[in-house]
Image (cartoon, rainbow, N blue to C red):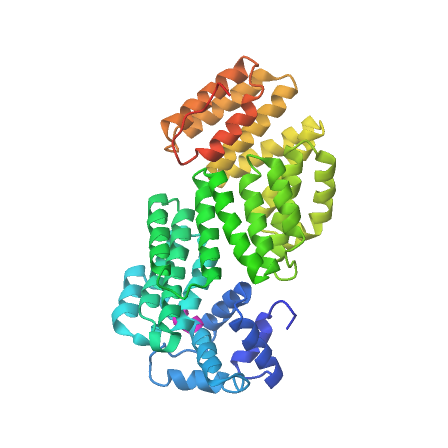
Amino acid sequence: MTERHISEELFGRFLQGEVSKDEARQIVRHLVAGCPECAEMAHRVTAASGVFGLQPGAAGWERVYEKVFARALSFATEAEQRIALEKLRGWAQWAALEPLVPQLRFVEVEEADKSYHTYGFYTRLLEAGRWTSRKEPAEAVDIFRLAVVVAERLDPALMGERRAVDLLAHAWGALGNAKRIADDFEGARRAFNEAWRILEDGTGDPAEEAHLMSLEASYMKVIGEFELAEASLEEAYEIYRKAGDAHQQGRILFQMGDIIGHVNPERGIAHIRKALALIDAEREPRLELCAKHDLALFLTDSGQPAEALAMLERARPLYRQFKDDLTQLRLHWLEGKIAHSIGEYPQAESIFTQLWDEFHALSLNQEVVLVTIDLAEVLSKKGEPARAAELAAQCYSIMKNWGLHKFALGAWLVFQDALAHGVAGDLLHRVGEYYRRHWFMPGELELDR
């Protein structure tokens, strides 16, 4: 295995008992430590493997696991062996439940089989929910609901009573975050409130509080409360600073910058520069990429395109590591913004036009609106206000079908009219901020600032 990840081939041999004792120990230690990519790989390979043909709970199921994992777990204490074995079993348990509809999963876990009421299965559900959140948010909500059910049934004698409370609060926080991603903001708020209520009776671990603050700040960002989110994260940052956890300090500083930078680029730049000095890039290379991307973006927004371009060029090897569509679209958007900022209007127009088509095809509605504003600004600077107004009118005809609140539609008509008369000016930037703050939460566009 590499230092960072386990290969599918090596894990397949592990399941067949064909690895050395040292390799088995390394694999178990790596997976139990919580690597999300490798946990997802292990679940996929386990589900497809014939090794665990027996369903969890069936006769002989325990013996199968004992045979496969006994050697691998010989290095651990009895408690470590129990937790490790539970985590490893969790993959097979989730593989058995995943094909079922959510209602049947709940029946199986709540009533039919107490072997699911373990810390290992709980952690597997958290991993599965996080992995699913971006692509299938409604499915992730159901997975985290199941994690809450499992957390409520964990044995406090094994976990420790207050630690079990922490785990339940953690599950509620994860559920709140999933509801936020699924655009259920009222449900998210209720879930976060429940998490905070439960956490009052927990161990008092500051890291649990900081984690919940981070999730809640993401919710605040989506509903447009950027300054409140930034202030909340200051407290989380202080918790990690006192604990001496440099990487987590970096994560929180990046989150602060990512949130505030869209309305105050200078503050975003300051936070992210500090974050990059603290982030462990080997541990989270995607986090490093996101930080460098945002730094280049906010440098562009603050009128420093040369520095932004230099940062972009340094980050290109990282972009090549992450070839998913969203990452590549974000890269092209940044390239378009830099081209616009340095006066390369034809290139910027070409990039923004292509992005408009891509975002529209993917139903990324907020992105469609924001890139329309970018493209309209380029057209205005090229001396083509009529084309800019026509673009805005085309976008409005699409926006009417999205179910946006009346203020959002009204603000677009004001913007469209200003483009038609060639007087958009500062309104271009204010409209962009407006749709970041009020995409979901109704509010009027302020015209007299």
**Residue at 43% from the left image edge and 67% from the top image edge:** 123
Seen from the viewer's position, the closer of residues 449 and 94 is: 449
* Most foreground residue, 90 or 221: 221
Is residue 156 visible to the viewer in this orientation of the structure? yes
The percent position of residue 422, horizontal first and vertical second, equals: 57, 14
Where is residue 89, by image quadrant?
bottom left
Task: State which quadrant residue 345 falls in.
Answer: top right
User: How many numbered marks does the figure carry?
Assistant: 0
Quadrant in the picture for residue 279: bottom right
The correct choice, above or below, for 27 with respect to 302 in the image is below
Q: Is residue 333 visible?
A: no
Magenta region includes residue 81:
no
For the residue pair 285 and 11, the one nearer the viewer reads as 285
Give the image location of residue 118, x and y in percent: 37, 73
- Main secondary structure type of the part rendered in magenta: helix
Magenta segment range? Answer: 91-95
Residue 115 x %, y %: 33, 76
Q: Is residue 418 above or below residue 198?
A: above
> Is 231 positioned to the left or the right of 144 in the image?
right
Q: Is residue 165 left or right of residue 235?
A: left
